Image: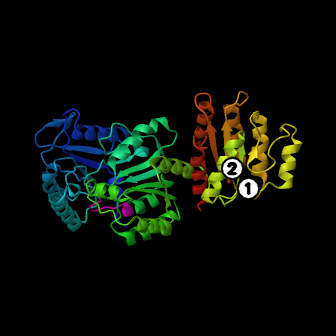
Amino acid sequence: MRNLNKIFNPKSIAVIGATPRKNSVGQGLFKNILEYQTFRKEVEIYPVNPNRKKVLGKKSFPSILNIKEAVDLAIIAVPAVIVPKIIKECCQKKVEGIIVISAGFAETGKEGKILQDEILNRVRKAKIPMIGPNVLGIIRPSIELNTSFTPAIPQKGEIAIVSQSGALIDSIIDRNPLENYGFSTIISSGNEADLETSDFLEWLKLDSQTKVIALYIEEIKDGRKFLKIAKEVSKIKPIVAIKAGKLKTGAKAISSHTGALAGSYEIYKAVFRKAGILEVETIEELLNIAKALAWQPRCKNGIGIVTNGGGCGIVMADHCEDLGIKLKELKKETIKKIEKSGFMNPAWSKRNPVDILGDASPQRFKIAVEALLEQKDIYGLLIIETLQIMTKPVENGKIIIRAAKKYPQKPIICCFLGGKLTAPGIKLLEINRIPNFSELREGALAMKALINL
């Protein structure tokens, strides 16, 4: 296992290419890193720019070799043709880690590949771990470390993302303020000339902030290494992945994005399966399932459905059957408990899915939810709420939160379907780490991930 601690927890950073020039990568990158120093006063930040005496009030150095103190992490954001010279100086300086933001390497063709091989040979000889080239950078919200040029840092949480696409990370970060979940670490791996997804998995395995790992993969260079490491990590922390370039058109596009060769998708499917990785089809699914895994416990196969909309219950049952999720039959004592309450409409379904009908009050939700959770062989619950005049999303949310606390070993996934009037109930659920999905299939997929079929 390679030591990446000085990359992810640096005490001194040199930013090579730092500049005060507005709307530039060098300025955005340096401003973000200065925020890290605000959070951790003991950290030293060194701008490196031979054409500037100062950058944003900090003394600038013409070369990293002019910095007398030791440097943990060197971040490089200069034109590709200059990078080999900069890498040589970083190796002379004996930095502990390097991130190459610069693009213009293997993703551009033969000449770029030659440049990439040159810098790779240098860092390998010096035994210095390198992320990149062609990356956005890394972000660790828990310590306010942002070595990227993205304009914002997401809220902290328990999901780690490793992505070969930097633009995808930008989009996720921009959307994050609208969501209730956060991230432990975000890693843009780019061309993966040196450090690969496998190396990051090893580091995340030991990261106390990370509970779930999400991967965006274009290419795995060393399949055996990836399979071995991912298999070990997935036993401790769930891994969710999306594979780009499954078909011919996408596979061709990959070579001009990160310079990777896509390989057969069937091989990737087999590797994911053997490694215990949950594969998803969309970015939405990647984030939603990661959220469910971060917030809810795992369970055996056998769940209950509670709904105040019969049609939605049927659709959810179809999704569950399609995904291999078993719906448990209601025990006689469970049916009796619900009947004896005196609150249930005589026309309720008396079977799983439990349809408590459209006129359901919060009391009916309470009775049905608690009765199903009390049944020992029901290991998790899908709860659907559709909005009628008598529906009270906030009160229903409070009932579900209390039930979740009473049965912490049983996962609960909600599908509160609606808009403006339902939003307060959804917000309450998610603040209390009960995931809500606006699509029934998304809820079923999340439950499948928790069952780990």
- The circle drawn on residue 410 is none
Residue 307 is situated, as x and y percent measured from the top left of the image, at 71, 42
Residue shown at the point (62%, 37%) measured from the top left? 417
Residue pointed to by mark 1:
378
Figure quadrant of the N terminus: bottom left
Q: Is residue 278 above or below residue 66?
A: below
Q: Please tell me whether mark 2 sits on a helix, a strand or a loop.
A: strand
The structure's colour scheme is rainbow
Magenta run includes residue 393: no
Seen from the viewer's position, the closer of residues 182 and 287 is 287
- Label 1 neighbour load within 10 Å: few <14, some 14-19, many 20+: many
Tell me, yes or no, if residue 298 can be seen here.
no
The segment highlighted magenta reads 192-199
Classify mark 1: helix, strand or loop. Answer: loop
Amino acid type of the residue tagged 2 in the rendering: Leu
Q: Distance between the residues labelled 2 and 1?
A: 8 Å
Q: Name the residue under label 2.
A: 381
**Residue 222 point in image, percent of width and height:** 34, 69
Q: Which residue is at a point 78% across and 51% down the rendered structure image?
A: 374
Q: Which amino acid does label 1 sit on?
A: Ile
Q: Where is residue 71 in the image (x, y as percent from the top left)?
A: 24, 52
Please report contact status of discs 2 and 1: CB closer than 8 Å, yes or no.
yes
